[in-house]
Image: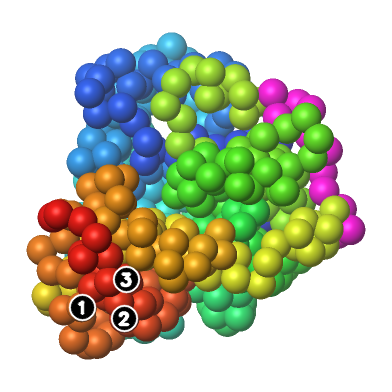
Amino acid sequence: MRYVDYGKTGKKVSVVGFGGLRFDLDKSNEENAQLIKYAYEKGINYFDTAPGYCDDRSEDIFGVAFREMIKEGKTDFYVSTKGKPKMFDTSEKAIAAVKRSIERLGVKKIDFYHVWCVRKMEHYELAMKKGGQYEGLLKCQEEGLIDHIVFSSHQPGDEVMEILDKNKFEGVTMGINILNFPYRFKGAEYAAKNGYGVVAMNPLSGGTIPKHSEELSFLAKQGETAIEAALRFNIGCPEITVSLIGFGKKQDIDDACKIVDENEVYSKEDIEKIKNRLGENMNAICSGCGYCKVCPKEINTPAYMLFYNEKQMFKKTDKEMTELVYGLEYWNYTMNSKAQASECIACGKCESECTQHLPIIERLKEIAKWESEGVNDVTV
């Protein structure tokens, strides 16, 4: 395992981190905890979770593992968790949230606590208001309950830079992967250059890369898969401190650690070559984060946007999309929507929540046309 400095914090972290969003919920907390302990034995020392992950079981699963590890004298690991400005909008709520996470995780303190899911500057401003979340986190820091206050961002690179320039945080977590990195990489480069830690989440683009590994094979070098290329990219970028990976089994951990051992640090020329392989529209894919599911008409917007990736990523024609829209795979995928795309009232709520800043309303109009034309060809 390779270890690097997390910004100016003095902490040496593994370049691969354990992301706590992919546990097998058919297994017990105790069974899932063994995967965390295995990752630690393989050299991973950065563990990331949040309240609500995995049906709100993730922090508890980590708590099982950490208590066992601490009992065994293994304390050289770092814990990361989070709190949203909207949910913890007062100092008192923020302090209570930190204490709650500490209790669930079975540790004495949180090493990296995130102001979570900053999607626009309004969210940052909410966290920073007088008597708000940030003020509570500072109090926790003074009491030794938090080591470092950081933030999690779904913003363009320029806005990440704007927040970093305010000197309130020591690091940032962003969704960076081989498909969307031009959209956010400017922020990662700026952060790394100025001594901030940079954690990259969502390295496989919400499952898009494994699902379309054949179509995305152009990303890979000879002898590797698109999945391997994506992981090598995140792990190899010197601007990225930690690449979070959601592990489901021991083999996933072994594979990631093998890539670390084999991988070289990428040069600027290497990154530029990868950028040139991407089409201009690769930045505009839906990563499936689900934040846009706020439709007052109860349209399942995330499902529709993931469906639209077929056109955006793979250049499918309107005729092909019309044929797909009621195909078995995609109809099952979107059928739990309580309203169809045509019922969009263009209120803009989904677009204001979108982490990728996609033109959702226009895309729903296109999908509505495909659904209208496609319904004539199937029995629904």
| Amino acid type shown at disc 2 | Lys
Question: Position of 320 compared to 183: left or right?
Answer: left
Q: Residues within 10 Å of mark 1 (few under 14, many from 20)?
A: some
Residue 365: numbered disc: 2
Closer to the observer: label 3 or label 1?
3
In the rendering, at what x and y percent does residue 36 appear?
43, 24
Q: Which residues are magenta?
A: 258-269
**Vertical placement of residue 128 versus 207, above or below:** below
Q: Is residue 167 left or right of residue 259?
A: left
Which residue is denoted by mark 3 in the rendering?
370
Confirm whether residue 315 shows in the render: yes
Quadrant location, the C terminus: bottom left
Rendered residue at 20%/78% (across/down): 342
Residue type at numbered disc 1: Ser
Residue under circle 1? Answer: 342
Q: Amino acid at mark 3?
A: Trp
Q: Where does residue 172 sit, x and y in percent of width and height?
A: 54, 61
Label 3, label 1: how far apart the Cα atoms are:
10 Å
* Residue located 61% across and 47% down the image: 215
Percent across and percent down for residue 117 are: 38, 64
How far separated are the C-alphas under marks 2 and 3?
9 Å
**SS for callout 2:** helix
Q: Earlier in the sequence, mark 2 or mark 1?
A: 1
First-in-chain label (3 vs 1): 1
Task: Left or right? Give the position of 76 relative to 104.
Answer: right
- Helix, strand or loop for disc 3: helix
